[in-house]
Amino acid sequence: MGHELNNSQKQAVTHNEGPMMVLAGPGSGKTMVITHRVINLIEELKVDPSNILVITFTKAAAITMQNRFENLSDSNNNKKVLFGTFHSVFFRILKSYYDLNVSQIIMENKKLDVFKEIVRQLKIEYEDENEFINQVTTEISLIKNELINVKYYNAVSCSNEDFYKIYSLYEAYKREKRSIDFDDMLIKCYNLLSRNSKILSSWQSRFRYILIDEFQDINRVQYETIKLLAKPNNNLFIVGDDDQSIYSFRGAKPEFLLNFPEEFADTKKIILNNNYRSTKNIVKVSRSVIKNNHKRYIKNMITSNNDGKQPSVIETKDIGDEAKTVADNIMELSRDKNIPLSEIAIIYRTNIQARAIIDMFLDMNIPFIVRDKAAIIYDHWVAKDMISYMKLALDIKDKEALIRIINKPKRYISKAVLEISKKYSDNMWEGLYKHSQEKEWMTNRLDELQYQLQVIKKNRPYDIIKYIRKEIGYDGYLENYATYRKIGIEGLTEILNEIGESTKNFETIDEWFNHIEEYRQLMEESNNNVYKDSVTLTTMHSSKGLEFGIVWIIGAVEGLIPHEKSNRDKDIEEERRLFYVGMTRAKEHLYISYINNRYDEPAVQSRFLDEIYDYFSTKIEVGSIIDHKKFGKGIVINLNKKSVTVDFAKKGKIKLNIKFCIQNNLIKC
């Protein structure tokens, strides 16, 4: 960071004993505070290094923190300070009591294999095995981290009966193999310490000073365990920012940070509100958004950095136009202003939004890396269904494609008939028609499908998708599937819409198929771009902790940010925190784009943009000097919420639309 500790940082670092809550806004130097705090404990308060525990949320963060500390510290004795994640620390505690070793930990790949076997054993129906298992495992992890008894839990991913069976069989597997997974590390540690006072006392004596980074991300089982370990002295030093609490889907709650002073009497509070990362304009605009959340600590972020450029709100026609606008801007910045691509990030709410950007980068040969390990959209089972219809239209004998789509929508062709028909090596249709000879309804359905395939073969991919959805009835099939699975249909529909959007520029099926292959190759190559000069593509969730000279936030429309699934007030507040995290990644320039049409339907600007416009409006008052790109300088003589009347020296009195001027960067004030 390259600066001396400021007064707030010094107060945090030199805190004596008892609970301390450090509210650290974006770019405020929290890592520096934690490392200097550890040094102060050792050198000034003469604390034994082995009595200090520093917990972070990721292994990489723990290593970074430890390296920074050791670079600041001369003594080898100081290496006794324990830096680790919740999982590594809690596993260390478990090993002291149970006969456990690393080989007994079920890694994620193995865990998924176990669940696959369980689900197959139970013969649960689903469309995509990996998708279903990911939903179930995420849900199981959530209830464990929340310390919820599975017997009283209403499942979301499947029926309560199936969920309980899956859960029970997985627990039985672990008992039989004497294995634990990463969730067990947390729960078993909590149970051990809460039920065995002797062991708890031993670890309380060991960890007399506990420091926790990113406290806003803590979940219930972690919080309850830390509360046990911190007793009786409660020398608990927590650093976090409730405004950056964005992982509720993992069980993280800002309430743990908000209610900390109530849980721990005599908590001292320090606010780190000096942003060393961003320009004044970025700090002010992001502050104007987050202040609209009600359940938060007020921090009033400031910076000593220069004003910088005013953040830009940019209007685009649709997803394709937005991608072209972003790509053109990046090319200009790289070519004309020599800005490294590695200093540029494109941030979005959901992974699906990356598709149009990647397509455009493919056309314009812009190197990029994708931070999220997201599946390629064309590998989603809904996309595979669309592709299979087209493959079958091109090659009527494609068995794999036929089997995939024949009951989507339901045509009531039984599995038994399909299995027998598959044995007809040359033409599976022959087998299907043979078994329909005495079933006129079945023959009619097969004839209808063949006619539909002929229609598909003659059309453009974009029209084909619409035909499959509406005329063939795939949308209805999806509705029935979503109802059966007790899941929202919105996510599946969005995949379909995005696939349709991806076909717009292609005249033939073959052209689109070739594009898909190029897309796959580009995604594979992007994994090797880590060490190249590349633009970073990332979700808002994955952008946390990063910083870039230039940031584009795309898709600032209702339904994306805030997301359409966020209906409750607390959900909207988390969406606003996500938007705030995205904004505060920017050091020099922030672009925010929105689209007027999404999937051929009118789109509404995000409510968070209105909060930005409101901020710009408050900067203008009667008597202010306005500098307009076209009209020059003038004095504000009248204004209301939507418009301002300016008396320009050369043009006289002109009434301006504030929102339009802001969107088009026409005024400075």
Image (tube, rainbow, N blue to C red):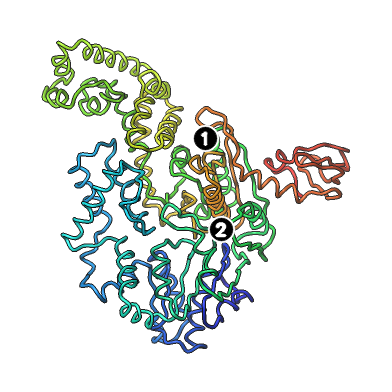
Q: Which mark is residue 472?
A: none
Q: Is residue 45 above or below residue 356?
A: below
Mark 1, mark 2: which one is toward the viewer? 2
Mark 2 residue type: Asp
Give percent across and percent down for residue 96: 26, 76
Q: Is residue 518 visible?
A: no
Give the residue at x 47% y 89%. 46
Q: Is residue 625 visible?
A: yes
Give percent across and percent down for residue 78: 41, 84
Would residue 234 appear left or right of 147 to someone viewing this image? right
Q: Which residue is mark 2?
A: 243
Which of the pair 395/162 is nearer the observer? Answer: 162
Q: Quadrant of residue 475?
A: top left
Q: Which residue is mark 1?
A: 319
Quadrant the N terminus occupies: bottom right
Provide the secondary structure element on which disc 2 rests.
helix
Q: Is residue 439 above or below residue 616?
A: above
Give percent across and percent down for residue 411: 26, 20
The alpha-carbon separation of the residues under discs 1 and 2 comes to 29 Å
Mark 1 residue type: Ile
Q: Quadrant of residue 29?
A: bottom right
Would residue 29 appear left or right of 151 to someone viewing this image? right
Q: Is residue 662 above or below residue 224?
A: above
Give the residue at x 74% y 47%. 617
Give percent across and percent down for residue 476: 37, 25
Which of the pair 248/651 is nearer the observer? Answer: 248
